[in-house]
Image: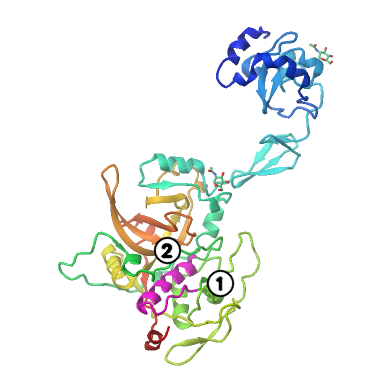
Amino acid sequence: MWQCPLGLLLLLSLPGHVALGAQQGRGRRELAPGLHLRGIRDAGGRYCQEQDLCCRGRADDCALPYLGAICYCDLFCNRTVSDCCPDFWDFCLGVPPPFPPIQGCMHGGRIYPVLGTYWDNCNRCTCQENRQWQCDQEPCLVDPDMIKAINQGNYGWQAGNHSAFWGMTLDEGIRYRLGTMRPSSSVMNMHEIYTVLNPGEVLPTAFEASEKWPNLIHEPLDQGNCAGSWAFSTAAVASDRVSIHSLGHMTPVLSPQNLLSCDTHQQQGCRGGRLDGAWWFLRRRGVVSDHCYPFSGRERDEAGPAPPCMMHSRAMGRGKRQATAHCPNSHVNNNDIYQVTPVYRLGSNDKEVMKELMENGPVQALMEVHEDFFLYKGGIYSHTPVSLGRPERYRRHGTHSVKITGWGEETLPDGRTLKYWTAANSWGPAWGERGHFRIVRGVNECDIESFVLGVWGRVGMEDMGHH
Ligand SMILES: *[C@@H]1O[C@H](CO)[C@@H](O)[C@H](O)[C@H]1NC(C)=O
Ligand SMILES: *[C@@H]1O[C@H](CO)[C@@H](O)[C@H](O)[C@H]1NC(C)=O
């Protein structure tokens, strides 16, 4: 077990060990503050043992890097005690260290007391009585291994760390970032409208609503940790459609909060809701603008009651309605109510959806969101098999809804041509492609073509007159 420092000299000349020049050792050693004045900091560390290093007498180069300083594996350190490597006594002398080990755990160069905690992404680690860290083992929403697997695979899209999702569990992502309930089977079987493609009619290979209707297509919204995508996607589609159908005379951003707080019949606000219920409300009651009734946000874990409805409307003839309350935002006076005509369901053939989109504007689509979608950063999304080999709790999904705004085709480096939809999500402008994403088109990827809705903004002659 005892060896001469010559072997160590060879070791020290390897790259990475150069900082430990033997020449510096002697002087430094006597001046250096003790490493162990408060006990051994790295009780579980293997130092002397790792290099099989134990030296007789005093050997200043019988040393190893230790938490940014140097520790020794020679007998001399036993005299001063304070600069022996943590495993010196145990490994070289076969005796326990001559002072009691510290009460606590090490992390990132710091000592944490027993019951001290730190967060490792979405998991809390706690310092146990036995001075070992114990960490929760939840699947995290941002999973670096999954990001790597997606980016190394040839899936047509890239994954990344969306910082708003860092620290959340996958379960929280599913519970707080989606929020559309699947329609009942009777709604799911809702009559589909079939548009007729004229004989010989060819749809363009690419289309983007914001190019056909500049300034009338609104930017992606941010639902935060409110599972209310039912209200956000409905407000988003209605905002664009009211703007388009009024020929730009009205370009409101409609208020998701108005739906979340006031459309409460069989709806759960930030705990989820139905699209048919949301459209019924927009048609029969109408909503104000987002300026008038801003989103109040919701932090996850908030268990309190939903905020009460702050906006009401009354009929003013011919089905039109008028607000009976001031805007919840007291700086805004305009409490105009916006309404829509009855919603209609489009055939699930992609041509039907394309024609509707091109003629009348963005449409709303149901979408089944899987664990990998949260990591989307760019490209043409399709659900990947990277989590297939992992336990069930890593493979989660939930129902969401989004606004489809266009389509296109792209030829990948490997020669495959992928057809896609472009869509706006409600996870803020920093997620994905500036808040948007592209998803494979024509194969009902993630159910995106299974339930697609369109609607007309309710626009009267009087709305076209002023403004
Ligand atoms: C190490 O130091 C302790 C305490 O000073 C002493 O009792 C012990 O004999 C020393 N061991 C060796 C091998 O020198
Ligand atoms: C992800 O982003 C967060 C917030 O910006 C950052 O703290 C974290 O270190 C990042 N994680 C990885 C693996 O890049």
Relative height, residue 179 to residue 120 (above, below) = below
Residue 402 is labelled as 2
Element assignment for label 2: strand
Foreground residue among 130 and 65: 65
Residue 284 in view here = yes
User: Quarter of the image holding residue 194?
Assistant: bottom left
Foreground residue among 275 and 4: 4
Horizontal side of 154 relative to 58 (left or right) equals left
Give the labeled residue for mark 1: 294
User: Ligand 1 lies in which image quarter?
Assistant: top right
Quick one: quadrant of the C terminus? bottom left
User: Quarter of the image holding residue 66?
Assistant: top right
The magenta segment is 229-254
Number of disc labels: 2
Q: Is residue 235 magenta?
A: yes
Relative height, residue 425 to residue 85 (above, below) = below
